[in-house]
Every structure is written in structure tokens, then in C-alpha cells.
Amino acid sequence: MTATSVSASAKIILCGEHAVVYGQPAIAVPLSDLRTRVQIAPGSEGLTVNLTDTDEVLPDIRADHPVSQMIRLLLDTCGTPEPAATLTVRSDIPVARGMGSGAALSTAIGHALLTLVDCQMSRHKLNEMVYNIEKIYHGTPSGIDNTTIVYEQPVYFVRHQPVETFTMSGTLSLLIADTGMPSLTKAAVGDVRKLYDRDPTRIQPVLEQIGEITQQIRHAMSAGEAHRTGNLMTRNHELLRELTVSSDKLDHLVKVALAAGAKGAKLSGGGRGGNMIALVDESTQMKVERALLAAGAVRVYHTQVSG
Ligand code: PMV
């Protein structure tokens, strides 16, 4: 086998985060231009993994590292011994920004191993494995990250239900603005749980409204109704504020994006830090991007979502 390369994309949650943990639907989309790539070079002895972004080298697969665990899980399932090769991993996906860097790493490693040992595996099975590794990173994740990344398609996700990918009409033009602060998903999920346990009669309707909005966004996306999608996204942000997972900076960036002409804006993912997203079009993209940078976003990505 000659040197070859495989990859997996980033993802972003469009709507439904946090409520998804309580059985409500959420929608996430792949970000195909932000990727984790694995270069596979056949070797003569054992498997070495170079994680270039963190300068780590995993000289053997017995280490207690999520990458090693993914490799072992996959080799056990395929019933194959450790292959002789060097895997070199490079990623464009920022870590701890709600873009699924962990799931992308596990998925890309999975693709690399399947290529190396020539094992056939369904996406369903690969998704299950990546989910098991996600649990090491995130405790009890809903599974939306790994599902969107393994299938690399827009996903309408309901916990414990079969994966539903869907088609949308037209293209959504999204700006993703990085607050510069890590997204504290685990802490935020824990705080929502405490809030829920303290006052379920107040919080349950908020979660249900988020679920309702997510269903409406799915219809609006399928019908190509960008304005409606935008309005619903902004309403979703207000409900996430009620769940206490926003922050002053996220609220400020949302306000600034709307004032500069975005059709809708909200935080995305775990919240508290991480990213916010703004729905724009050709005529507003530059203005909203400049406004977000001037308001303190450390980076703004532009991406087109279709599918
Ligand atoms: O921060 P992210 O993009 O990994 O998303 C977390 C989404 C939550 O709904 C808050 C948690 C989950 O596991 O779905």
C-alpha cells in the first residue's frame, strides 16, 4: 500500500442544543471545509500515531489515550492484528469550540484504520464506536456530534432514535464567530440538569419550545425559507438564555450580528463560550463579519451549508 490520506469534517449545531439531551430534536450540519486529515504511511513494525497539532506521539496502541482506545476498539471489532504503519494527524478544527474536534479525530482515525486493514464497516457501526470514544471526552454526550461527522450530512437528531439525514432546499450562508473562550459543554450541561431538577415545571416548557422551533427550522430549511429560519434561530437563542447557557459575550455578538443585518443569530453548542452563528446572505455577509470582529470575535468562519 502506498501513502494515502483520509479525513473527517467539523460540525456545527444549528438548533436544539441542550434540549436534545432531554429527548427534543436538534439539527447539526457538517462543515466540509474544516477537516481533520490522517496521512497513512505503511511501515515495517507496529503502529505509530503523530498528533502534530498537540506535538504528541503515541508510540503504541496500549496507551490510555482516546485515539489509542479508538484504534483498539476498531481492531478488535475487525478481528485484525495491529498493522505496521505511521499515521500523521493534522487538523484545521479548533479544539473546544463546539465544532466536534474530538469526534472528527476519532472518525478520521477510524477511516484510516479501516483503509489500512481493509475492513468493511457500516456507518452505523462506526458511529457507535465514535460515540463510545466521545463518552471519554464528554461524559454523557447526546451523540449529535459523532452522527453528523460520521454521516457528513445535515442531521435531524433525536436521542435513541434512528439517524435521520434530510435534504434542504437552497443554501444557507453561515458565519461562525469564535468568542475566544472555550465552550464549557460539560459544565453547562450539568448546570441545565441542576436547573431542571430544581424547577422542572418551568424548564420543561422551555425545552419543549426549543424542540418545536427545531421542527419548524427543519421545515423552513426544506422549503428554502431563509428568513423564517433566521427568525427561528434568534428565538432559539432567547430560550437558551433562559437555560443560562449564554454569556455576555455571546449575547453581545448575537445583538451585533442582528443589528448589522443578519437574518438570525444564536449561540451554538454547549455555550458559555465557544461559537455563535449568524445567518447571512451575499449582501450582508461582509458587514456582519466586520461587525462581529469589531465586537470582539477572535475569528469568523464563513461557510455554505447545503444538502
Ligand atoms: O458544544 P458542542 O457543539 O459539542 O455541543 C453540545 C451540545 C449539547 O446539546 C449541549 C450537549 C450534547 O451532548 O448534545
Image (tube, rainbow, N blue to C red):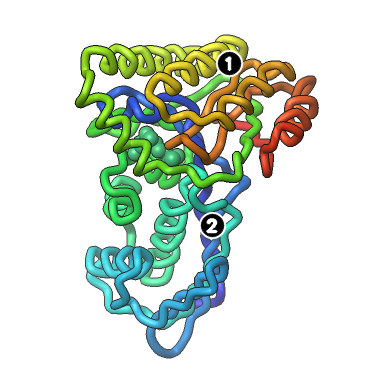
Residue with the mark numbered 2: 36
Residue at 60%, 18% in the rendered image: 264
The local crowd at label 2, few if under 14, some if 14 to 19, many if 20 or more residues have their Cα within 10 Å, is many
The local crowd at label 1, few if under 14, some if 14 to 19, many if 20 or more residues have their Cα within 10 Å, is many
Residue at 59%, 22% in the rendered image: 265
Where residue 106 sits, quadrant-wise, is bottom left
Q: Give whichever of 25, 155 is nearer the camera.
A: 25
Q: Is residue 61 above or below residue 259?
A: below
For mark 1, give the secondary structure: helix
Residue 209 visible in the picture: yes
Task: Tell me the amino acid under the disc marked 1.
Answer: Gly
Q: Position of residue 69 (x, y in %)?
A: 30, 66
| Left or right: 97 in relation to 25 | right
Q: Give whichever of 300, 7 is nearer the camera.
A: 300
Q: Give whichever of 29, 99 is nearer the camera.
A: 99
* Callout count: 2
Which mark identifies residue 230? 1
Of labels 2 and 1, earlier in sequence is 2
Q: Position of residue 200 (x, y in %)?
A: 21, 18
For mark 2, give the secondary structure: strand
Task: Tell me the amino acid under the disc marked 2.
Answer: Thr
Q: CA distance from mark 2 to mark 1?
A: 29 Å
| Left or right: 71 in relation to 216 | left
Q: Position of residue 221 (x, y in %)?
A: 52, 18
